[in-house]
Image (cartoon, rainbow, N blue to C red):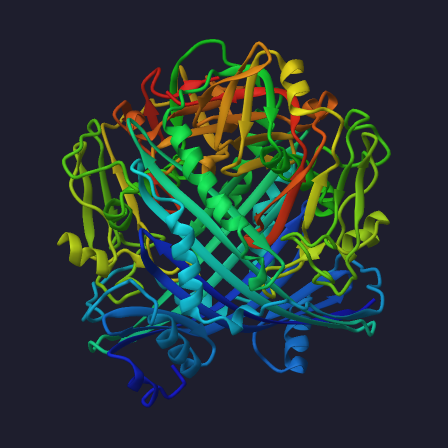
Amino acid sequence: MSQDVSSVEMGCDAWEIFYRKTEKKSILVEKGRIKNISSEIEEGYAVRVIVNHRIGFAFSHDVREAFEKAIKVARVSGEELNNFPEGGWTKVKGIYDARFESIEADWLKTAAESLIMPCAEKSVNAAFGSIEVERVTTLIKNSSGFEKEKKETSCTAFIEAVYDGSSAYEYVQSRNLEIDFESAGARAAELAIQSKNPSKLEKPCSVVFDTLALNQILSYTLYQAISAENFLKGRSPLKPGDFFGEITIIDDATLPGGLNTVPFDDEGCKATKKEIFCKGELKTFISDYRNSLHLGIEAGNSFRDELTSYPTITPTNIVIKHKRSSDVESDALYVHSVIGAHTANPISGDFSVECMNAFYNGKPVKAMLYGNIYNVLKKIECIGKNTRQVDFTVSPPVRFCEGAIHIV
Amino acid sequence: MEFYDIRKVESSSLILNLENGSVEKPRYERSFSKGFRFLKNGFWGIFSGNVPDKEGIERAKANAVEKGDASVVEAGKGGKYVMKVKKNPEDVSIEEKVKLMREIEKELKADYIVSTKVVYMENVRKFSYADSFGTEAYYEVTRSGVIIQAVGKDDVMQFYSRRILKPAGYEMFDDSVFEIASDVRERLCELLKAKLPPSGEMDVIMDSNLCGVFVHEAFGHAVEADHVLQGSTVLAGRIGEKVACEEVYIYDDPTLMEFGFYPFDDEGVKAERKVIVERGVLKSYLHSRETAAKLKGKPGNARAQGVAEPIVRMSNTFMAKGEYSFDELLEEAKNGVFLAGSRGGETNPATGYFQFNAQYGYIVRNGELAEPIRDVSLSGNTLSILKNIKLGNSIEFDPGFCGKAGQLVPVSDGAPLALVRAKVGGVA
């Protein structure tokens, strides 16, 4: 934090400075060829203040301006708090890889070639792809005495493969450079080839959501509903003690190498591991500091999407546990990914999506799926053996009983 | 060919959320960013960061390490545009803005409404552009608006929202915002009584809002020339071909004073209307300066969030009106569903399959609107739908933010009512 802030703290009762510097490098692929290489440096100050128990927020590249504007908007704020958290931190592993510091264009080119190669070998069009590596340094300092820095690295690769009228995409994400680009490219190519000429499924059956499809649907339904703020504001259909089958769901911000593992959240509250559902019973919600005080629960789930964003309750690594099986896919509709997940109703849990790549016993299927996530969670048959993380969700593929998800 | 350009964006915004009577997460933001591109040996090097211009160009050039096939067409002369607003939002006190929000919120009161949210937003974007051909462009555009949302509870919980977002100053907040709020209240009452929809393929009348989303998601993304070059759109290589029935005309027009308005695109090209489909024939794609060079098109459709890489985007995309009244469309449909409003949608341009979710609807029985339905979605294939579509006789625009490659830009979609055959799905 290079700017002097000692004199600007005067106009408020309490304050918090959130500084973040992001250094990003990326490479873009279009139609099987490398198209561009870019780099980016972004930094700035997001300031929150408390004036007469009311919180104000502002972002600027100039910390003084951020303070002035935050104090101004605090005048009308109804968001009340006496102080910012004293905070804390947890020792976590696997979120920073020093090798990111020396990544140059050649490394990106080699990685992009690995991503594209499996498509080229199968005469599949690697229509669009990207690899992005980033190093993020975050410093939080507040008037309650918290002052701590966290450093993180991440790498994300994406590839969309198109083959004779069908398409598929695949992701791979990691905190370190042990990342298998080639497998992601091969999976996208294989899915695009296998998805050609899908037919309609004529009979009801069990449905298996791959981790990717599961993450898409849960992000717009369940993950909204387990927010303490949404619960307190009447925007969640869930309440503690509700039962949803046998599922256990843990929000684990301390998971070694997890994509969202952190020592502390973006308010300075220490990372924790929380059992949200234990054998089907809803035990608690994920929360930021302010709402945690209302509910008497742990904080640690407040994050900022972008540097300019207001901190919002967000899951970290959602670990899903259930009875495991080595054969989840047979005689079931296997769904790799869907389109339209964001149109789900976060209040009721109802979703209706179109399958992007789906198969029944290996044959491609086109289908629209609809259901209610809370009914669906009660009807899990089993989960697979191979756990993978996609964004928030850490889970193997999940198999739902016949009739739990409707197929049109 | 060597080419470079420099973009500078200064943006200031105020966002206020009035949730259940309390102003939550009030947020002010002012940012200044610079973006640089360097084209060398047909390959782009890109850099963004607040560094001196010379250093920025050098850093972008240092990323241009490969060989490629990119080139750019010239942007024209550039120019200057400063939007004149009648009432600058920055001259209105924050307390007065909150007072307006509270008045809007009053319209949402009803015993069945358990949660309300009114979001106020204002933004000023100051954009400057310069390139190595000598093009220079500058503009200042103000955008303002409100989003009004309520959650109702009876046997089920439902939410409904509407928004008014415009390239305008504080003068846009007239009586219409209160009318929209009372529509949210009344519509929610109706939704709580609504039944679950039927499922299967059937006749569907889309209202202007939902049809606008169809035009944007299912068709607009498929005519973005970067998708054409990637070989990931069903409309690649089909200029001059019939892709819809003769009644269909589709345009993209950034000069309309709707939410997707811009005077110059993010490559310094003066904005102008593009004819996408005329009498059902595909006439042109949307282009950046690079895709225009490769496909011999006209540039002017490259946009960016902040100073991210400009990519081909829509602005105000609309389907022209047809001849049918609502009653005539109901008569044509006879039995099916009428679907209205949108909770968004998604499309796969490579296959043409789309999925949208309506905010509410009605069963159509014997050519008349019958009972209301909720939580209903629509899916189908773009080109099959456009082959047989009957259009209403007036159009409306609906504003929103469109996401592509991780970037959000303001857009609007316009359309008339439309009768199509598509797959409808509901929930259990």
- Residue B230, image quadrant: top right
Residue A319 in the image: above or below residue B105: above
Residue at 47% from the left image edge and 26% from the top image edge: B376
Res A213 visible: no
Name the foreground residue: A208 vs B22.
Answer: B22
Q: Is residue A276 left or right of residue A72?
A: left
Q: Is residue A300 above or below residue B370?
A: below
Q: Quadrant of the N terminus of chain A?
A: bottom left
Q: Nearer the viewer, residue A116 or B127?
A: B127
Q: Residue at x 84, y 69 (%)?
A: B77
A236 or B330, which is in the foreground? B330
Residue at point 80%, 60% (across, down): B72
Q: Name the residue furthest front.
A: B175
Left of B96 or right of it: where is A276? left
Name the residue rendered at 19%, 48% in the picture: A274
Quadrant of res A312: bottom left
Q: Where is residue B368 drawn, in percent x and y? A: 57, 15
Q: Position of residue B428 (x, y in %)?
A: 37, 20
Q: Where's residue A334, x and y in %?
A: 43, 24
Residue closer to the observer: B415 or B199: B415
Side (left or right) of A85 relative to A374: left
Q: Quadrant of residue B393?
A: top right
Residue A279, horizontal then vertical, whole percent = 16, 32
Tell me, yes or no, if residue B269 can be seen here.
yes
